[in-house]
Image (cartoon, rainbow, N blue to C red):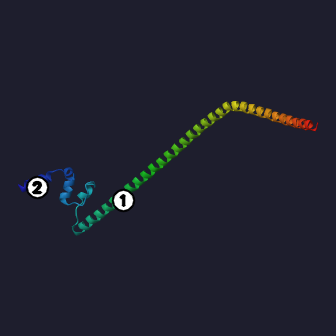
Amino acid sequence: MEKEKASTISKVPEETKELNTKEDVVSRGDTLKPGEPNERAKEPDKGNGGLSASRQEVITNENASHDDIQRSCQQLIDDINAKRKRDTDLLNDFKKALEEQINTSCSVLEESIVQTYEKHSKTIQDKLQELFAVLERISKLESELMDFRRALGVLYNDMQVV
């Protein structure tokens, strides 16, 4: 019976043997990780040197894995920096658009104020001219009153002398 199993296993095509599942790798104790190429799994061990070669493969794989992680981290950092640059550019564009809107709003407000000034300026100007005319009449009346007081003073003095 054992021989039948052995002969059945030997009859399985090579392609089927190459398929290594995670469970197969762990159960065999292979140093390969599940995502590694199957070619390394086919390499035969070479006596005492096989152990050190296997260890070198692990170190190489760890270095490759380390390099992959380092590259992935660098890619993530580059992506973050690119997104930050986009965010900064977007913020600058937003500031420019906001400044343009503020300038437009200020221009509209300034124009409205100027129109209001012009509208009320005529009324104010008329009132001021009227005020100055009244002040001028008051000045003339004060002058006439002073002349009248002087004349009255002279008349009083003349009446007292007589």
Quadrant of the image occupied by residue 5: bottom left
Task: Please give the label number shown on residue 67.
Answer: 1
Dot 1 crowding, Cα within 10 Å, few <14, some 14–19, many 20+: few
Name the amino acid type tagged 1.
Asp
Where is residue 48? Give x, y as percent.
Answer: 22, 69
Q: Is residue 121 left or right of residue 45?
A: right
Q: Name the side, left or right, on which 149 lies relative to 74.
A: right
Q: Quadrant of the N terminus?
A: bottom left
Q: Residue 65 appears in which quarter of the rendering?
A: bottom left
Q: Position of residue 78 (x, y in %)?
A: 43, 53
For image coordinates 81% across by 33% down, the residue present is: 141
Q: Which quarter of the rendered picture does the C terminus lie within?
A: top right
- The residue singled out by tag 2 in the image is 6
- SS of the residue under disc 2: helix
Q: Extreme bottom residue here?
A: 48
Q: Which mark is residue 94?
A: none
